[in-house]
Image: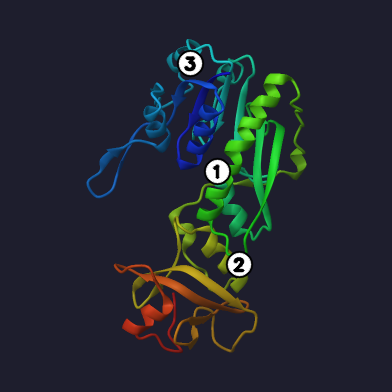
Amino acid sequence: MKIIFMGTPDFSVGTLEALIAAGHEIVLAVTQPDKPKGRGKAMQFPPVKEAALAHGIEVFQPCRVREPECIEHLRTFQADIIVVVAFGQILPKEILTMPPYGCVNVHASLLPKYRGAAPIQWAVINGDAVSGVTTMRMDEGLDTGDMIMREEVVLNPKETGGSLFDKLSVVGADLCVRTLSAIADGSAVFTPQDHKAATKVGMIRKQFGRIDWTLPARQLECLIRGLNPWPSAYTKWNGKTLKIWDADVLPEGSNFAPGCVVNVTKDAVQVQTGDGILVLKEIQLEGKKRMACDAFLRGNSMREGDMFS
């Protein structure tokens, strides 16, 4: 098939590479504009742009793909289908109906669950046992189109947003190739979603990682994993930000207030929550490197009764 590929982050690259390996012709890669990054604010290519250029594929980076001139530019490529993987812009009807086979989206959740942004992180934050990928025929709604194929992925007890991201990227790439084969040979089945069962989720923002110690320990442990590696869960200790990268849960409680250190062992810090104790295993103090708690405690004095804000 002649494909226009739309995607931006690392998650999209696996699918682009898989489509190329499967023999499809990628006539254009559409991605978000370059953005400044780092202290020097040097302009950085989106991962999809880097991958496309490595394969000699033309790249198009519109600020707003719904602008008439952008739509007409896409039309000139006469693609059979448009594949969308975490592109980052809403497509208008003029684009959705442009190619003969329409637009297919690779979505990192088991639709209709987790429509919207950050479905991977929300699966971990909410403590789901299973996540997955769904391919769907796009319509004008937000992740509301008919489902084509889906594949489940069981989460590891210590699954993080980052590790699930990597797993679903691989699964999504393979699923997309199989989906396009089914569409091409006419065997694809398009199943409407149960809109009443839909769960909408929003963007993850940095401030979302601030820990509320009145919440249950299990909920906080899921939050810590879901926000790893970005934006990370954090608290305040002695006026400095303390990021928490890994923690365990003890179901028993204490008479201490939420956020209070109830015990310090040689390799962990135990903190009272609204329900149960959160055992900090890997942390990072502001201005320092990420490290296991035993290494942190060798250079820092943390005692029973200390409070996290």
Residue 158, located in which quarter of the rendered image?
bottom right
Which colouring convention does the figure follow?
rainbow
Residue 244 falls left or right of residue 41: right
Residue 72 circle label:
none
Question: Disc 1 to disc 2, how far (Cα)?
Answer: 26 Å
The spot of residue 43 in percent (x, y) is 28, 37
Compare residues 168 and 222 and report the one nearer the observer: 168
Secondary element at image label 2: helix
Disc nearest the viewer among 3 and 2: 3
Secondary element at image label 3: helix
Give me the residue at 70% from left, 39% from top. 150
Residue 169 circle label:
1
Q: Are marks 1 and 3 in contact (CB under 8 Å)?
A: no
Q: Which residue is mark 3?
A: 74
Give the quarter of the figure containing the N terminus.
Answer: top right
Residue 219 circle label:
2
Q: Amino acid at mark 2?
A: Gln
Question: Disc 3 to disc 2, how far (Cα)?
Answer: 45 Å
The spot of residue 81 in percent (x, y) is 59, 20
Q: Is residue 132 visible?
A: yes
Q: Amino acid at mark 1?
A: Ser
Question: Disc 1 to disc 3, how far (Cα)?
Answer: 26 Å
Residue 201 falls left or right of residue 207: right
Q: Earlier in the sequence, mark 1 or mark 3?
A: 3
Q: Earlier in the sequence, mark 1 or mark 2?
A: 1
Q: Amino acid at mark 3?
A: Leu
Compare residues 267 and 208 and report the one nearer the observer: 267
Q: Are marks 1 and 2 in contact (CB under 8 Å)?
A: no
Q: Is residue 111 visible?
A: no
Compared with 50, 272 (above or below) is below
The spot of residue 232 in percent (x, y) is 45, 60
